[in-house]
Amino acid sequence: MSRCSPAPRLCDLGEDHVVAELTRNLPFSKGKVRVGPGDDCAVIGRARDERWTLLKTDAVVEGVHFSKDEDLRRVGWKALCRTISDFAAMGGVPEHALVTVAARAEMEFARLKDFYAGLRKAARRFEVGIVGGETSRSLDSFFCSIAMTGWVERKRCVTRSGGIAGDAVYVTGRLGGSFLSGRHLDFLPRLAEARWLVTEFRLHAMMDLSDGLGADLPRLAKASGCGFEIWEDRLPLSAGCTSAQALAHGEDFELLFTLPARVSSRLEAAWRERFPRLPLTQIGVLIPRAKIRKNQPNPVNRGFDHFA
């Protein structure tokens, strides 16, 4: 007599598997969708268009992305800047946002106003128009979702899937300790840096680091059909952090990108001149997938997983 196995739970599957299954075979107009689910933004446009439209939605949830007693002005800043960071990852420009919030009826109105003050501050800083949204009642945690539109020039659009074996792998800034230090509430999305990069260089692949290098680099390499080698001794660490924390902590919102190794020297020299206060570090290389078993990439600590 056989026993039925229990139905798999989200925590049994993990975030990447859940997302892959949910987005499989979603209906969309293939004629205009350049990039669908699986990248930092969706990309819409005809092949001949000079500019393509970018679409993105992101959320912050009390108890997951910020603590219950946090200053909601800082949370409002983070909510908008998380989404802006995804536009940076595509080399694009954000334009308009819709804001959906769900709050307990017992929440003090002054705290909700503080949240919107943070939203307005970020919107002014990065020239994003907040053009509408929705409010709803929550029975438990405070929640906000940001839906945003923008654009990128067709020739400057960068995805996760364009990496090529032999590419140099770079990160901006320093990694680790963002949540523990509170930096995740005050970070600056690398919008100006990304626009400069896609203007001055031909990047092959790019994404932002939200779930940690240990989760996001394997995603970029897999999307590009490559393996990777990571040089842990070269990771740019935040003060007081170990390489393991830099790999696993997440919430850094730095840029992770690849480009031909032959231009590394020119990139680094130009970067130092343009952004002298922000580190840029080569942390590894992409390798052919066929070499993964023979030359297994260094093990990395897995980053954040919503369902782990």
Image (tube, rainbow, N blue to C red):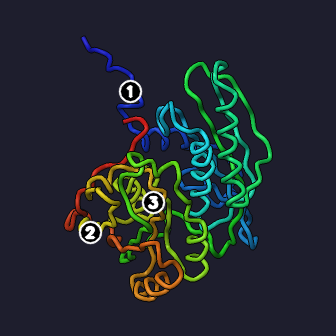
Instruction: Verify CB contact (< 8 Å) between mark 2 and mark 1.
Output: no
Badge 3 crowding class, 10 Å Cα cut-off, few under 14, some 14 to 19, many 20 or more, is: some
Q: Nearer the viewer, mark 2 or mark 3?
A: 2
- Judge whether 291 appears above or below 144 on screen: below
**Viewer can see residue 287:** no
Question: Residue tagged by mark 1?
Answer: 8
- Alpha-carbon distance for marks 3 and 1? 25 Å
**Viewer can see residue 20:** yes
* Identity, as a three-letter code, of the amino acid under mark 1: Pro
- Alpha-carbon distance for marks 2 and 3? 20 Å
Q: Which circle's residue, 2 or 1, is located before the other in the chain?
A: 1
Q: Which circle's residue, 3 or 1, is located before the other in the chain?
A: 1
Q: Which mark is residue 264?
A: none
Question: Residue tagged by mark 2?
Answer: 231
- Judge whether 270 appears above or below 157 on screen: below
Badge 1 crowding class, 10 Å Cα cut-off, few under 14, some 14 to 19, many 20 or more, is: few
* Quadrant holding the C terminus: top left
Residue 250 image position (x, y, % from top left): 40, 50
SS for dot 1: loop
Q: Nearer the viewer, residue 46 or 72?
A: 72
Q: Residue 223 carries which label?
A: 3
Q: In which quarter of the image is residue 247?
A: bottom left
- Residue depicted at x 56% and y 71%: 193
Q: Nearer the viewer, residue 108 or 232?
A: 108
- Residue depicted at x 58% and y 76%: 198
Residue lying at the far top in this picture: please name it: 1
Position of 242 with respect to 132 (left or right) is left
- Judge whether 257 appears above or below 73 on screen: below
Position of 265 with respect to 66 (left or right) is left
* Identity, as a three-letter code, of the amino acid under mark 2: Trp
